[in-house]
Each structure stands twice: as C-alpha cells, then as structure tokens.
Image (cartoon, rainbow, N blue to C red):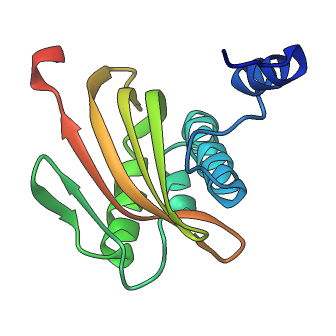
C-alpha cells in the first residue's frame, strides 16, 4: 500500500487552490503578457467612455503591420487610414461605451499576444441617438513603445442582437 504523508497532500491541495498557481505550461512571462494585455483592454474601455473615438488611435500600432477588418471586410489597411477615419467619425460621436466579456489572451511570446472577447458597444451620437452592437473581437496585441497596442483587429458583428 502506498504511504502518502499529510504534508505532501496538503502541499498538493495548496498548489491547486493557490491564486498564484498557474495553468500547466503557463510561465511567469505568459502571466505578465496576460496582465499587460488585460490592462490595455481595460484602458480602451475607460478611454473610449471618457475621451471618445479618438482614443482608439492611442491603442493602434503605428507599425506598418496594423490593419483592421470588420465582418470579413478590410476597414483600415493601415494606421493612416484609421487615423483619417477616426478624426472624422469623432465629430459625430459623443461617447462610446464598450464592454468586453469572456476575455481570452493567448501569449505568443514576450511581446505578442492574441486578444479575443465578446463585446457590447453603445455609440451615442452628437444628436443623442444611440446605436448598439454586439459580437466578437479578435486581435493581435504587440508590446511597442513601452505599451501594448493592437497590431491588427477584427470585429465580427452579431446581427441577431441588433
């Protein structure tokens, strides 16, 4: 019969319930990436509410790799096209309320991660009219210039929730 000490069992139990325990295969670097990308996602929500659409530009990578698609269509081929659109769009929007749900972050390395989440968004126009949308967001985040930025993004709008 196998003898197992109480100290050994307590140690295993403690590791299983410890908030500091990591998923199998998750490293400390993965955890740092996860936390950094989550902070970026939270900051996007806060800044969109407080500042408006122009705050998106703070979170788009200025690298030549940036692009954004929506429902399978290329919306912005690069940062410059996003910049031009956002400044025009911001004139007609008073506020954006974005919420993320079920955020998933997959670390691809110390400076690259996939961010995925369900989202709900309420756009309040300058006239006060509100437009809502919901769906799923995926994007690649990269650590550049001392912070996390979206290198690319795709919004899938759920038209059944309109």
Comparing 8 with 151, the one in front is 8
Q: How many marks?
A: 0
Q: Residue furthest front?
A: 1
Comparing 26 with 104, the one in front is 26
Q: Residue furthest bottom?
A: 64
User: Which corner quadrant holds the N terminus?
Assistant: top right
Q: Is residue 69 left or right of residue 24?
A: left
Kindly identify the residue that appears in the image at 61 percent across and 43 percent down.
Answer: 38
Q: Is residue 77 left or right of residue 139?
A: left
Vertical comparison of 150 with 19: above or below: below
Residue 150: horizontal and vertical position, in percent? 46, 62
Comparing 149 with 129, the one in front is 149
Vertical comparison of 85 with 90: above or below: below
Kindly identify the residue that appears in the image at 36 percent across and 55 percent down.
Answer: 139
User: Which corner quadrant holds the C terminus?
Assistant: top left
Vertical comparison of 84 with 28: above or below: below
Q: Is residue 90 left or right of residue 136?
A: right
Comparing 10 with 45, the one in front is 10
Kindly identify the residue that appears in the image at 72 percent across and 35 percent down.
Answer: 21
Residue 137: horizontal and vertical position, in percent? 32, 42
Q: Residue furthest right?
A: 7
Residue 91: horizontal and vertical position, in percent? 41, 48
Kindly identify the residue that appears in the image at 9 percent across and 53 percent down.
Answer: 72
Residue 132: horizontal and vertical position, in percent? 29, 22
Q: Is residue 107 left or right of residue 93?
A: right
Residue 18 sits in quarter: top right
Residue 81 sits in quarter: bottom left
């Amino acid at each position: 019969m196998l003898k197992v000490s109480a100290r050994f069992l307590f140690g295993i139990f403690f590791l299983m319930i410890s908030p500091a325990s990591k998923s199998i295969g998750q490293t400390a670097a993965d955890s740092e990436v996860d936390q950094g990308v989550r902070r970026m996602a939270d900051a996007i929500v806060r800044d969109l509410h407080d500042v408006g659409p122009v705050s998106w530009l703070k979170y788009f990578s200025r690298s030549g790799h940036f692009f954004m698609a929506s429902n399978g269509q290329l919306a912005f081929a690069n940062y410059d096209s996003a910049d031009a659109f956002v400044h025009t769009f911001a004139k007609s929007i008073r506020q954006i309320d974005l919420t993320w749900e079920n955020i998933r972050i997959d670390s691809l390395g110390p400076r690259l991660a996939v961010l995925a989440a369900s989202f709900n968004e309420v756009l309040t126009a300058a006239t006060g009219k509100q437009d809502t949308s919901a769906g799923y967001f995926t994007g690649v985040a990269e650590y550049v210039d001392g912070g996390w930025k979206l290198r690319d993004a795709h919004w899938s709008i759920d038209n059944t929730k309109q």
